[in-house]
Amino acid sequence: MFDFITPELISKFIKFGVVGFSGLFVDFGLTYITKEKLHIPKYVANAIGFMSAATSNYFLNRIWTFESHNPEIMLEYSQFILISIIGLVINTFILWLLVSRFKFNFYLAKVFAIGVVTVWNFFANLFITFSPDALL
């Protein structure tokens, strides 16, 4: 039933998770600074933190997780960022839903949103950005 789950896939997902965890520091750090110190609206601050983390995550995932040798770095980066933007939309919707409708703490809601978006980002990047067919 789950024949697609291989040790290689599990290894990539774990590496993706480690990179994503490092991105949490970038995301939460910039979100906090822009929201709390610079008084930028919370959803804009969230976008700044999220997209900054996506950029650092791209480079780490390219080198370590997916070991990409694709010479079309700008195309690959663009695909990664487009997937991240879709992830940001999902993230923001979940954040809005949990904060506005269910009265969750903003940062707790952000943790839930990141968890959902991690699964989206991993599989979208596996099959699109870093697919072996991407070199064609």
Image: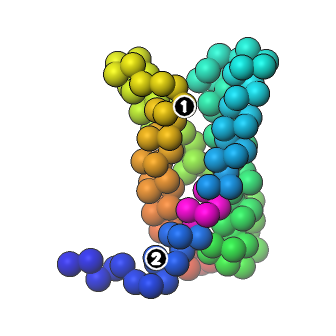
Q: Where is residue 122 in the image (x, y as percent from the top left)?
A: 50, 61
Q: Identify residue type, mark 1.
A: Tyr
Residue farthest toward the left in the current orientation of the protein: 1
Give the residue drawn at x 50%, y 41%.
111
| Nearer the observer, 51 or 35 | 35
Give the residue drawn at x 73%, y 73%.
63
- Relative to 75, does residue 62 appear above or below in the rendering? below
Q: Which mark is residue 13?
A: none
Q: What stretch is highlighted in magenta?
A: 16-20
The Cα–Cα distance between marks 1 and 2, rounded to whole angstroms, is 28 Å
- Dot 1 or dot 2, earlier in sequence: 2
| Nearer the observer, 1 or 80 | 1
Say which residue label 2 marks: 10
Would you say residue 19 sits in the magenta stretch? Answer: yes
Q: Identify residue type, mark 2.
A: Ile
| Nearer the observer, 79 or 7 | 7
State the SS at label 1: helix
Say which residue label 1 marks: 107
- Relative to 30, does residue 45 appear above or below in the rendering? above
